[in-house]
Image (cartoon, helix red, strand yellow):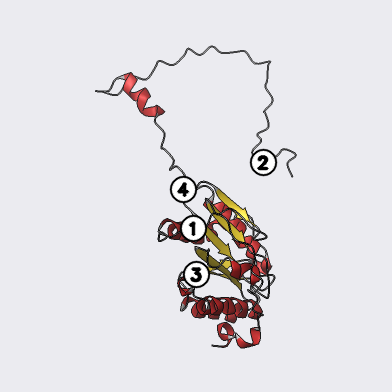
Amino acid sequence: MSEHPPGYEAEQPVDLSRPVTYRPPLAPEPPAPGRRPEERKEKQKKAPEEAAPEAVFGLVTVANVQPRTFKSTVARKLNAGLEPRHVNVRLWNGVGTIRLDGLVVADMPADPHGTDWRRQSWATDQLVLPVPDDLQAARAAWWMLDRLDAEGRPDLVRSALVVGIRTGGHRMLARKIVKTFGERTARVFRVKLPGGVAPDGDETQWEPLVTAVSQALKHLPSRNRPVMLPQRAPNQVVQLDSRRHGKAANQ
């Protein structure tokens, strides 16, 4: 193994015993016919301009009430992909309250009662559901969609983006998640996390999800947006019963 860090080029030894040969400087290259030297220099200075980040407003909720569903991984990848595209992008852990100016990506905590996630569902602009190839995770995500339908947010169900995460643990279930959730939501994105680990340099497979969220935020319908997310309401408690919500795995 080289002792030098990557990208380092070791200097070659210089033989000072050899005589130095004089080389006259090369004559400058004549300008192209019909173009003055000043014009050529001006053209070389022009560099392609990068698109400036756009300002969008919205609350993106990454949620699954079942623990160990790679919510934080999805939220971090989404936040990292949106930051170069938009200004004032913030990653939030979903605890307490937060100002809703700019673009907020909420990494909601796992909660079988759904209280933290459900209290902000009315303010959410885009729902992202991580669903790994796990039976309980699929049932919990289906239960969340059922609650949204029952509580007056069917639009959030139809526009939801599902991240079908393939760990290699249950291939048949992974295919069923794509089919079943694809019939109820806007789109299902397939992401591979072998062994449940996100490999280095895997940003390419997250690009379709980032693009879909970015486009959805640009075309949000106009509505009155709250400045602050309200605190939890004590009556917003509905116990998750995964035995009654097994459609994602049993169909």
- Determine which quarter of the picture holds residue 146: bottom right
Label whose residue precedes the other's in the sequence (1 or 2): 2
Check disc 1: other Cα within 10 Å, few if <14, some if 14-19, many if 20+.
some
How many other residues sit within 10 Å of disc 3, few (<14), some (14-19) or many (≥20)? Answer: many
| Cα gap from disc 4 to disc 3, whole angstroms | 22 Å
Cα distance in 3D space between marks 1 and 2: 49 Å
Q: Seen in the image, is 88 located left or right of residue 196?
A: left
- Residue 216: horizontal and vertical position, in percent? 44, 60
Kindly state the secondary structure of the residue where label 3 is placed. loop
Q: Secondary structure at mark 1?
A: loop
Where does label 1 land, which residue? 225
Mark 4: amino acid: Ala
Helix, strand or loop for disc 2: loop
The residue that label 4 is drawn on is 55
Q: Earlier in the sequence, mark 2 or mark 3?
A: 2
Residue in front for this viewpoint, 156 or 210: 156
Q: Can you tell which of label 4 and label 2 is closer to the viewer?
A: 4
Q: Which residue is labeled 3 in the image? A: 160
Sequence-first disc among 1 and 3: 3
